[in-house]
Image: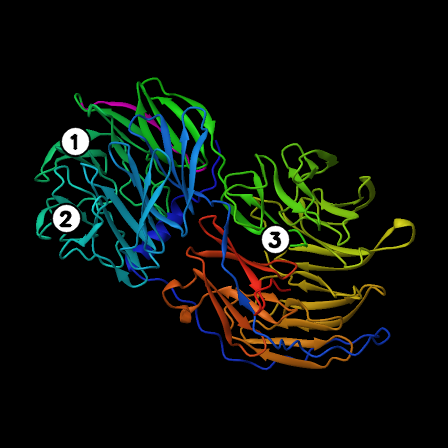
Amino acid sequence: MSGFRTAWRGRFLFFLILLSGCRALPSPPSPSTPLPETPVETRMPAPLATPSPIPTPTIRIRFGEPVWIGRGGLRAARFTPDAQSLILGWSVGVSRVRIPDLREEWFTPLPAPLRAMGIDSRGRWAAAVLESGAVVRLSLTDGSTRFLTPLAPNAQWCGLDWSPDGEWTTVQCIGPNRGDPITLIHWETGTVREVPDSRISPGVLPSPYWSGDGRGVLLAALQPPCPRFLDVQSGAVRWALRVGEQCLSAWTLAGSPDGRQLAVPASQGVLLLDSSSGQVVARLRGDPVSGFPALDVPRETLFYDASGERLAALGSHGLGSGAPPPPMPTQVWALGSGRRLGARPVGPGDPEPLAGAFADDTLRILYEDGILTAWRYTQGAEEALGRLSTEDAMPPLMMSLDGRYVAANLRHGGAAIWAVAPSATPVRRLSPPWRHPVLSPDGARVLVANPEEDISHLLELETGPLRRVLPGGRRGPQGAAFSADGRMLAYGDGARVRVVRLPEGTEEAVLEGFPSGQEIHLVVWAPDGQALAAASGVASGSSSLEPGLIQIWRRGSEGRWEPVGRSVSVRTTYARPLIAFSPEGEWVAVEEMPSLEAGASAVRVIDRRRGAETLRLAEHELVGWLDARRLVTVLPGTSELSIRDVETGERSARRFPRTGSEVFDLSRMLIARPSGARGGPDIGRAVEVIDGRTGERLAHLHHGSDIIEIRWSPDGRWLLSLGSDGALRAWPVMEPAGRPGG
């Protein structure tokens, strides 16, 4: 089994941030500096029509109600008490699947991202805390819900637990510069109240765990006075989670079925404490058990079997600093003898266990990539029972030109295509090793790559039939493209580009000249389909710093392709503008950046028909074309857009508050980016839309999770944001009359 999760180094960095209790704010824009006058003029083509003025919309763009696309990533899981079903917490939904066939029995969408989830000990209810501050109870029979909103919005990390009798839910969250008290919810009466003196520090992740007698709940802490159980009525401290002067972990706990013992992680195994006093009653020897919290939604790492005779600890990559962490395998102990019955390692490249449960003489384990196994821990054998379809999208997002469909690779392999509409399931899901989906302009077909077999398939999107099997499957996510009319296809095949005529699938050309050992990472067509440009870069997984090559070709008579120009850049594998044809296809702008040294970047403009460079803007970065003659660039370190007529050299500028994460809609001079310091309590978790002419903020669109990509749809009708939890949200762009507008 293979995994995607970053190992111990990323976790250590996260934990340092966690200890600080604050969120880093983006630096303010650097002071504006004059734009350099460095164009290199060469012989110019015949003049074009006078360019139109910079667009000045007479109406204000607004946005309609957003929709969640798909259900996002698999964030949490719990086995039902009989281990015959799984309750799954997705980024924006909860579902129940049956074991062993993994058939979904129900799915309930949620209106905001999931922050914590748990089920009661009797297997009747699940409860979930949402980023919006809402808490929802779900029936495990049919997924029906009851909502309460007792918490403040913008919850970033939460903890949740059910009381031993299953009547109360306790929740606690932290937010930006905010630590909440412990809140108790009695679902039958609707009673909501706070535990006195239970407010947590904003820098500590909450873990409001119930004591075995139902009279206390845990307030987490990192240092003395240590995590401590508070009386739920008075808030008085009952006892602290400590051994001598050493605080114990508040995030990895398990209570015995009779409520008398509490298991906590130790440096070499597990400690068993008396649940009424905190005294150590036994020690189970073994490898370390992770006492650190999960980085997203809390997990149930320690758990007993129903009889209280066995205890299991799920493995982890752990945390480390400069050296590999000690092994933290999945382990099982017999409590009567204290003997460890089995240990299964979790390697650096393996997916981590997400949930576990005892089932007779096996341990059922669900991994974060969706694979369910049965581990015979006394024998060491582990059998795969099935695999759930996980759907957490990864950048870059790929869209059809008509804006109807969006496609992406998935975090744990495979790919998916969704309709840009409210939907819990993709239009099409592709299992590993298929990936890198690229949509035709009308969204009717999709090209996908199989790098293991080095082939590509051209498929009908919704009806499913295979249209063509094409040679070559090694390329980057954006290493293929259809021409605007859908009649041509160009795609990477290792270090070359294959050009195919559609629908017949006849290969017209193979374009070579890229460095050996590199792969095609980007293909861009000219609007008329008579020219294209492609960029190569180091292959996936390579540590080479070798620059990539950008090459431009034009289609001559009889379908012969002729080279027009080339450029080099060390950023050809980055998801950023590298190549842009002008709207009428006369010019192509490309990035040049032979090294990462300061001042090494430039934007070059090449006359496609003559194959000559007509303009070179040193130290600029490419944005795109405003119209047939005016090119938009930005000078790093400044807060100005440079707008230059490539024929006359005339230049103007527009100021805007820059962070470096902007996405531009030049047809309307709109800028979208993750919210910055003035965004309020959802910094980095909302989209700001800015007027590119004035710098004025036009909209603040709340997403709820850390945003890792923003995308305008090609037709301008949608604005999409992708969160780090794999959740994809879309806002319709509306005119004042309420009609979708381009």
Q: CA distance from mark 1 to mark 2?
A: 21 Å
Q: Position of residue 620 (x, y in %)?
A: 63, 71
Pointer 3 residue: 573
First reached walking from the N terminus: tag 1 or tag 3? 1
Q: Amino acid at mark 1?
A: Arg
Q: CA distance from mark 1 to mark 3?
A: 51 Å
- Which residue sits at x=48%, y=41%? 4
Say which residue label 1 marks: 283
For the record, the magenta segment spans: 338-349
Looking at the picture, how far across and down is residue 702, in whole percent?
44, 61
Where's residue 99, x and y in %? Answer: 40, 25
Residue 519 disc label: none
Nearer mark to the viewer, of 1 and 2: 2
User: Horizontal placement of 730 versus 523: left or right?
Assistant: left
Q: Element under label 2?
A: strand
User: Which badge, 3 or 2, comes first in the chain's sequence?
Assistant: 2
Q: Which residue is mark 2?
A: 228
Discs 3/2, front: 2
Q: Is residue 168 above or below residue 575?
A: above
Is the Cβ of the residue at disc 1 closer than 8 Å to that at disc 2? no
Give the residue type that dot 3 points to.
Thr
Q: Residue at x 67, y 44 (%)?
A: 517
Task: Tell me: residue 58, above or below residue 86.
Answer: below
**Mark 1 touching mark 3, by CB under 8 A?**
no
Residue 3 at what x, y percent from top left? 47, 37
The quarter in which the C terminus is drawn is bottom right
User: Could you tell me the amino acid type at mark 2?
Assistant: Arg
Give the class, few, some or many, for how many residues have Cα within 10 Å of label 1's Cα (few <14, many ≥20): some
> Magenta segment: does it hold 599?
no
Per the image, is 341 magenta?
A: yes
